[in-house]
Amino acid sequence: MIHLLCKSEAYTYNVYHIIKAFFPSEEVITSVDEEASCYVEVCLPDEGGRLAVDEEQLADAMRQRGAAPKEQKELKYWIDVCLYRRLLKLTGRSLAWGILTGVRPTKIAMQRAEEGWDRDRFVPWFQEECMVSGRKAELAWEIAKREQAMLGRLDYEEGYSLYVGIPFCPSVCTYCSFSSGALSDWKDRVGEYLEALQKELVFIAKRSRDRKLNTVYIGGGTPTTLTADQLDGLLTCIDVHFSREYLLEYTVEAGRPDSITAEKLKVLKRHGITRISINPQSMQQKTLDMIGRKHRVEEIAAAYRMARELGFGNINMDLIAGLPGEGIQDMQDTLRQIEELAPDSLTVHSLAIKRASKMRRADLGKDQEKVSRTLEGMIEASREAADRMGLVPYYLYRQKNIAGNFENVGYAKVDKAGIYNILIMEEKQSIIAAGAGASTKIVLKEPVPMPGSKKKKMTYLMRIENVKAIDAYIARIDEMTARKGEWLWR
């Protein structure tokens, strides 16, 4: 157990996550004492001793860079820098993403690109400013420039994207923290859920009739858990109420191969779906069995080939690096099988253990140095495989509690990148979301006070969350639409 004492509540978030990145298996207990003599004090386990960041250390770090803090935000930055340096010296390990604790590191690169910076200016600045590795700085810049080119096709002011959530799966994977339920538990209420969902969709369509719909993404859960008739009914509702005049991309997560049939794929094809995901996560049978996926590796390849035969020309596949029991050789074998299938895009996730999942970080063992080395090898093998398949990195994000301080990267053929994936990371266009647990993000023209903020912080991004529980969503659908009505296209 690690005890963390901060002089101000404002310092706790970043400091906590930096410590967790160095010691992911340890519980971190945080407290605040405004009378403390140091900005941050860390008591480490197993006779690791005490680390502190005080006024003198802060001043010394700033002198080295010729800087002086002018406001609270800059002071927090220098506290992070000092703590990172102390932990680096103590452990002998650096973090791939340095002091960055947010989930969207490419936003920094995007901002600089929009300001007219070039690669030669950004990469060394990013390395020094945020202490990221040279390889990650290069990756962030490469992706930001690719995103910038793709997003230039969109109308941020008048356009929007639509997310539709289907919270059912054939079974719930042990690593999953989404608001999904096993179909067997909800089979008798799927019809009620779809009725509520369509009510919300009709409301969104009416309120958005003067806007340009650019992308639709149906995710979950596993949308193809629905029957062919249920899928047809949902897609017909969208066809009737939403215009496709400005639509650039229409994605459905086919996800689990044990939910895919030729009849369902034909329904998707008939409704003009342009992109689907068939997500194995691993091509190792022992792993699929361990994480609660009740299907065979052979079913993944069969579902993929069936989709190709039916004419789907943009198929994505997802993998997770760092699943329990897997080593670099397992990932290499998985990638070999994926290469034989040749998807149009490949998303590689680093395992992130959430509190709501059945899997616990303790299940992964405590040798974090070994975990990091293994993950690094898996990620490098994925990059090499993507390169062999002619896929280039086009979006990137990180998650809290992500193993090894790494990231999730999407690779795609030049003309097959997922526009919605970029939009949800860069937060430049409003995404209106329907369904249990769905999160709407409305990009505002003028800032408003952030809901729940004690210090009256202002925000340009209004988040509206639907309730996660499926039964509560059904019962409270009128409340869900009313929430959106307060902010939708003000």
Image (cartoon, rainbow, N blue to C red):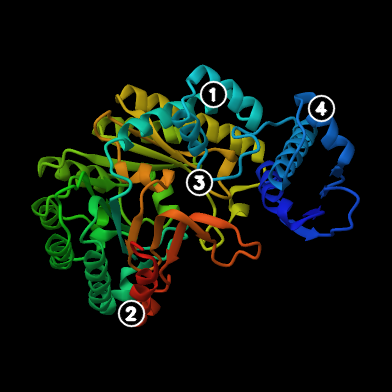
Q: Nearer the viewer, mark 3 or mark 1?
A: 1
Residue 461 vs residue 370, the one in the foreground: 461
Q: Nearer the viewer, mark 2 or mark 4?
A: 4
The residue indicated by pointer 3 is 351
Q: Earlier in the sequence, mark 3 or mark 1?
A: 1
Residue 406 location, quadrant: top right
**Residue 34 drawn at (x, y percent):** 84, 58
| Marks 2 and 4 close (CB-CB < 8 Å) | no
Could you say which disc has been placed on residue 63 in the image? 4
Q: Earlier in the sequence, mark 4 or mark 3?
A: 4
Q: CA distance from mark 4 to mark 3?
A: 39 Å
Q: CA distance from mark 3 to mark 1?
A: 29 Å
> In this rendering, is residue 111 above or below 298?
above
Q: Earlier in the sequence, mark 1 or mark 2?
A: 1
Q: Nearer the viewer, mark 4 or mark 3?
A: 4
The residue indicated by pointer 1 is 122
Q: Residues within 10 Å of mark 1 (few under 14, many from 20)?
A: some
| Marks 2 and 3 close (CB-CB < 8 Å) | no
Give the amino acid type for the residue marked by disc 1 in the picture: Phe
Q: Earlier in the sequence, mark 4 or mark 1?
A: 4
Give the amino acid type for the residue marked by disc 3 in the picture: Leu
- Tell me if residue 169 can be seen: no
Give the amino acid type for the residue marked by disc 2 in the picture: Asp
| Mark 1 secondary-structure assignment | helix
